[in-house]
Image: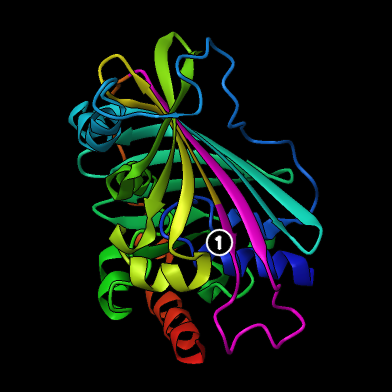
């Protein structure tokens, strides 16, 4: 694995739930296609203007997370692009999700490799390709991370990494003064309104630690349908290692990422089961140890 690929993996593991493909993005270091665009392809309704009481934009954005969760279940698509040291890794995922309890199934692919992912009762399971099982006890096909235990052991740091359901929570951290209506456009068969916003990182779960890596705010684009539900969400991050990290030549000075999360077919059936215990290696403690080491170095 190249130094760049190692750096991408380190950066992805430090993100608070924006990437559901934490293990997959370490599988290669090629270039990929642009996963999304912040530009609106529809009619410009008040483009670039702050959305205040007149158009209800701020209220719509702030309520979008709850309205989306209230929809119950949905099909999801995840597109991620991570760049460091001139290398780009792209990953794509498709699956279904229960937006209320976080249960989900997804197939992720990147660089010709595929990962099957499940989240069951807040435990993340990933079935790794054979070439990515080095370092996994017994080289078992499945790894798991208990997201609740990981959060408790790291003092709330990054408890939701890898959980697709965490994506919709970003809308709860939106700063009212930084909500701007871009226009309207079609997402699939849904009419949506596109907003550009800024997220107060401190308001996110594990935000205190995340802020050390990405700064105080994150730019985000939201496409909200006529029922107030999120149809597309795009989050851009620029991550830099905290002071005390990065001295190792294998650690990148900067990692940039874009994650596009789309929802459709609300009400679809979602079923997921934990894989057989005999085929699963618990990586929770190792992930917590790495997170603690990172905090101490920072």
- Asked if residue 240 is among those painted magenta in the image, a careful observer would answer yes
Q: Which residues are magenta?
A: 237-265
Residue 256 visible in the current orientation:
yes
Whole-percent x and y of residue 73? 27, 28
**Circle 1 is placed at which residue position?**
12
Is residue 157 found left or right of 138 in the rendered image?
left
Is residue 61 found left or right of 258 in the rendered image?
left
**Residue 55's quadrant in the figure?**
top left
Q: Is residue 224 above or below residue 80?
A: above
- Asked if residue 295 is among those painted magenta in the image, a careful observer would answer no
Q: Is residue 137 above or below residue 56?
A: below
Q: Is residue 223 above or below residue 89?
A: above
Q: Residue at x 38, y 45 (%)?
A: 167
Quadrant in which the N terminus is drawn: bottom right
| Image colouring | rainbow
Q: Residue at x 49, y 13 (%)?
A: 185
Q: Secondary structure at mark 1?
A: helix
Q: Residue at x 55, y 72 (%)?
A: 136
* Residue count near mark 1 (Cα–Cα under 10 Å), binned few <14, some 14–19, many ≥20: many
**Residue 181's quadrant in the figure?**
top left
Q: Residue at x 56, y 42 (%)?
A: 108
Whole-percent x and y of residue 201? 38, 60
Whole-percent x and y of residue 144? 40, 63
Question: Front-most of 68 and 268?
Answer: 68
Question: Front-most of 34 and 97?
Answer: 34
Is residue 39 found left or right of 160 in the rendered image?
right
Question: Front-most of 277 and 42?
Answer: 42
Residue 282 visible in the current orientation:
no
């Amino acid at each position: 694995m190249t130094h760049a690929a190692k750096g991408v993996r380190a950066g992805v593991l430090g993100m608070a739930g924006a990437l559901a493909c934490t293990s997959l993005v370490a599988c290669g270091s090629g270039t990929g296609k642009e996963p999304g665009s912040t530009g609106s392809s529809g009619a410009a309704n008040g483009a670039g203007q702050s959305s205040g009481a007149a158009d209800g934009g701020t209220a719509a954005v702030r309520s979008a997370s709850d309205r989306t969760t209230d929809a119950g279940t949905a099909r999801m698509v995840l597109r991620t692009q991570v760049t460091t040291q001139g290398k780009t890794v792209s990953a794509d995922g498709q699956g279904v999700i229960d937006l209320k309890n976080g249960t989900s199934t997804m197939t992720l692919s990147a660089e010709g490799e595929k990962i099957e992912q499940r989240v069951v009762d807040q435990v993340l399971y990933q079935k790794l390709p054979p070439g990515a099982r080095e370092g996994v006890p017994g080289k078992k096909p499945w790894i798991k991370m208990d997201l609740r235990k990981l959060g408790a052991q790291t003092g709330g740091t990054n408890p939701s990494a890898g959980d697709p359901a965490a994506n919709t929570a970003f809308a709860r951290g939106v700063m009212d003064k930084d909500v701007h209506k871009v226009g309207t456009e079609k997402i699939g068969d849904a009419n949506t309104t596109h907003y550009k916003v800024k997220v107060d990182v401190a308001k996110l779960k594990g935000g205190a630690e995340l802020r050390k890596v990405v700064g105080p705010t994150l730019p985000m684009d939201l496409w909200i349908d006529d029922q107030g539900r999120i149809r597309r969400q795009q989050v851009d991050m620029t991550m830099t290692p905290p002071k005390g990290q990065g001295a190792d030549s294998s650690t990148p000075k900067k990692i940039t990422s874009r994650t596009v999360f789309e929802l459709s077919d609300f009400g679809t059936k979602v079923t997921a089961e934990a894989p057989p215990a005999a085929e699963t290696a618990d990586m929770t403690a190792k992930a917590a140890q790495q997170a603690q080491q990172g905090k101490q170095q920072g």
